Structures are given as structure tokens and as C-alpha cells.
Amino acid sequence: MTTVENAKGSRQILWATLLKGVLLIVLGVWMLRMPSESFEAMAFVIGLIVVLGGVAESFFSYRIRRAQGEWGWNFSGGIIDIIIGIFLMVNPMAILVLITIFVSFWLIVFSVLIIRKAITMKQLGRKNWILNLLFGIVLLLLAIALIWHPQAVGLTMVFWLAFSFLSLGVFRIILAFQASSLLRNRNN
């Protein structure tokens, strides 16, 4: 492994990182501009972008395997991205169902804990136990409503995902430029 091969491999990883960052920013902007699009279309596009990012990462990792000692981790990460992306493209509602189940279960557990606390407060003679009981019941009803209407999660999730993808995309672009600067300084 020569210094030239190592530098060439490092530049290709930087390009893959930069490409993923740009794709994530494009995805985030699209999601903010088209929030009324169906969740299925959004999940399909997310799946496609994840597949493309995984292909780029696996391709560049494999291509520079001689120059990089630990190329297998990046290659494996790219393969996992491809599998997850294909799953989302084939079954776009899966992400909505999984998130709805997770959030609803968490809210149900939390609401039961609040109701239990209210009962304990009543037994101890505390005056504001009714407020806790009402809050726990309302939270429980909202959790049940989420199970019956997962679209509510999907709509708000569009905005949270958009901001998350924008942040991650900016981070990856900054990371690529910082790594590029370090690479230039190391080669000088």
C-alpha cells in the first residue's frame, strides 16, 4: 500500500461522504417543500436515497480495499443501507407502523405510570391527585388514538425527519471538508 494509493482511497471516501451529505440535504428540502405528499411516496424516496448512499459507500469501500485496512466496516454499512432501503421501497408503510407502535407503546406505559401515581397520591391524601389522573387518562386516550390513526404520526414525522436529514447532511458535508483539509495538511 503506497502513499498515493492511500491518498486516492481517502479522497474517494471523502467524495462518498460528501455525496451522502448532499443527498440527505436534498431529501430534507424536498420533505419540507412537499409535506402534503403521501407518506408512502416519502418512504419510497427515503428508501431510494438510502439504497443509493449504500451503493456509493459499498462501491468506494470495495474499490479502495487495498489502501484502507478496515474497509470491511464501511462496506458492511453500505450493504446494510441497501437492505434497509430496499425494504422501505417495497414496504413503505413499515416505517410508519413501527414508529407508531413504538411511540404508542411508550405513551401507554407512561400514562399508566401517571395514573398509578395519581392513585398513590389520592391514598396519601394529596389534593392535586385529580390533575395527574386526568393527565394520565388524556395521555392514554391519545396513545390509543395514535394506534387507530397512524397518519398523525406520519405527518409530524415528515417535519422531524426533514430537519434530521438536513442536519445530518450538513454534518456529513462539514465532515468531508474537514477530512479533506486534514488530508491536504498531511500530504504537504
Image: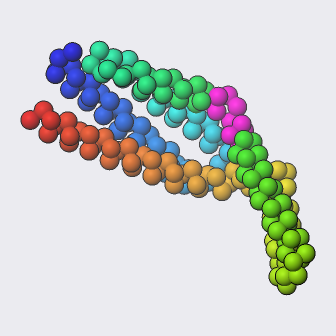
Q: Main secondary structure of the magenta part?
A: helix
Q: Is residue 3 magenta?
A: no
Q: Position of residue 4 (x, y in %)?
A: 16, 21
* The C terminus - image quarter: top left
Magenta-drawn segment: 87-96
The quarter of the picture where residue 14 lies is: top left
Counting labels gives: 0
Q: Is residue 91 magenta?
A: yes
- Residue at the extreme left: 188
* The N terminus - image quarter: top left
Q: Is residue 1 visible?
A: yes
For image coordinates 51% across by 51% down, the residue present is 164
- The residue lying toward the viewer, choosing from 91 and 69, is 69
The quarter of the picture where residue 39 lies is: top right
- Residue at the extreme front: 124
Q: Position of residue 140 (x, y in %)?
A: 84, 61
- Image: 61 above or below 113: above
Q: Is residue 36 visible?
A: no
Left or right: 36 with respect to 66? right
Q: Position of residue 68 (x, y in %)?
A: 30, 21
For image coordinates 15% across by 35% down, the residue present is 186
Left or right: 118 with respect to 79? right
Left or right: 154 with respect to 57? right
- Image: 188 above or below 117: above
